[in-house]
Image (cartoon, rainbow, N blue to C red):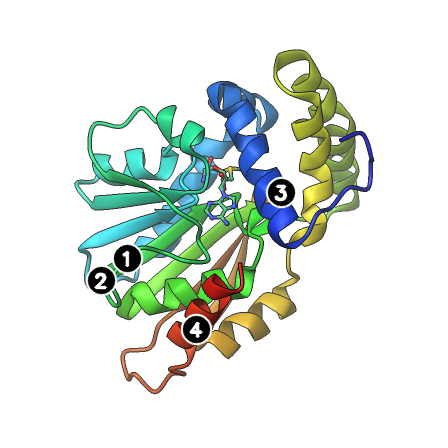
Amino acid sequence: MSNTSFLPLGDEKTRFVQGMFDDIANRYDLLNSFISLGLDTYWRRRTLDMLLGTLEKMDVVLDLACGTGDFMKTLSAKNIKTVGVDLSLAMMQNAKLDTGNLIQARGELLPIKDESISAVVSGFALRNFTEPELVLREVFRILIPGGRIALLDVGQPGSALISFANNIWFKHAVPLIGKILSDKNAYDYLPRSVAYLPSKQDFQQLAAKVGFSQITHREISGGLVQVFLASKSRTKNYPKARVAINVEKEQTQ
Ligand SMILES: C[S@@+](CC[C@H](N)C(=O)[O-])C[C@H]1O[C@@H](n2cnc3c(N)ncnc32)[C@H](O)[C@@H]1O
């Protein structure tokens, strides 16, 4: 993969993303801290504060696309039960967890019962999902009424200066660091994958279409990262067509 505009779609994207994370799994944590200058821990903590702050009922929290389980570790330290789902087995094999169940699955087809999860958190995965709408439908299905989601991902800083510095770092330094310490192709792809991220407005529309309400958007660290938040209403007046869509999708693969 040397094509600098390579942005796969459909099954090709799923295979590519899975292979890429399998390849970089054993150095993922090291590179992640390095690339974010250690801020990733702070960003995850802030995301969890946003997610958990207003939640009334707290049984199990799903870390969707959990990777090496960073959100799960923080949740467990708060005595909150967690389950992690990820496409990449190697990423989960590199998780250093004392508690919590890990399941290898696609976010687009979650092997989790309807209305069994209090909240869903996801870090740096939205742009990696092959079909974000199907993922949101699945997340909506498994959430209890009143459940919430928080999806953390990279952002676009508003300040011209921060944006300039971020671009240099993300588009030039990160691929170089990745080449030296891990896998060149994966870290070349990382800045390009931002093109998959929905805008605030697109996310708002998509989440509303799926049935979510209270859809909001927050920025952290001057917009270096962003969090998409939404709730599943307690009133149950939401669309019901999601299961049929998933079944049909599975049959066509
Ligand atoms: C950048 S890593 C983030 C890992 C972790 N959430 C974190 O905050 O460090 C993205 C993760 O998303 C997973 N992923 C990508 N597409 C997925 C999908 N369709 N379903 C489940 N996991 C997926 C990858 O395997 C990878 O572990």
Residue pointed to by mark 3: 224
Q: Residue at x 36, y 26 (%)?
A: 93
Residue pointed to by mark 4: 214
Crowding near the residue tagged with mark 1, few <14, some 14–19, many ≥20 C-alpha atoms within 10 Å: some
Is residue 157 visible in the rendered structure shown here?
A: no
Q: Is mark 3 within 8 Å of ligand 1?
A: no
Q: Given contact means CB atoms under 8 Å apart, are the residues at marks 2 and 1 in contact?
A: yes
Q: Nearer the viewer, residue 168 or 131?
A: 131
Q: Residue at x 60, y 26 (%)?
A: 35
Quadrant where the N terminus lies?
Answer: top right
Front tag of 2 and 3: 2
Where disc 1 sits, the SS reads loop
Q: Is mark 1 within 8 Å of ligand 1?
A: no
Front tag of 2 and 1: 1
Q: Nearer the viewer, residue 227 or 138?
A: 138
**Residue 82 vs residue 228: left or right?**
left
Residue pointed to by mark 1: 112
Q: Residue at x 80, y 29 (%)?
A: 2
- The location of residue 145, given as percent across then percent down, is 27, 73
Identify residue type, mark 3: Leu
Residue pointed to by mark 2: 116
How many numbered circles does the render carry?
4
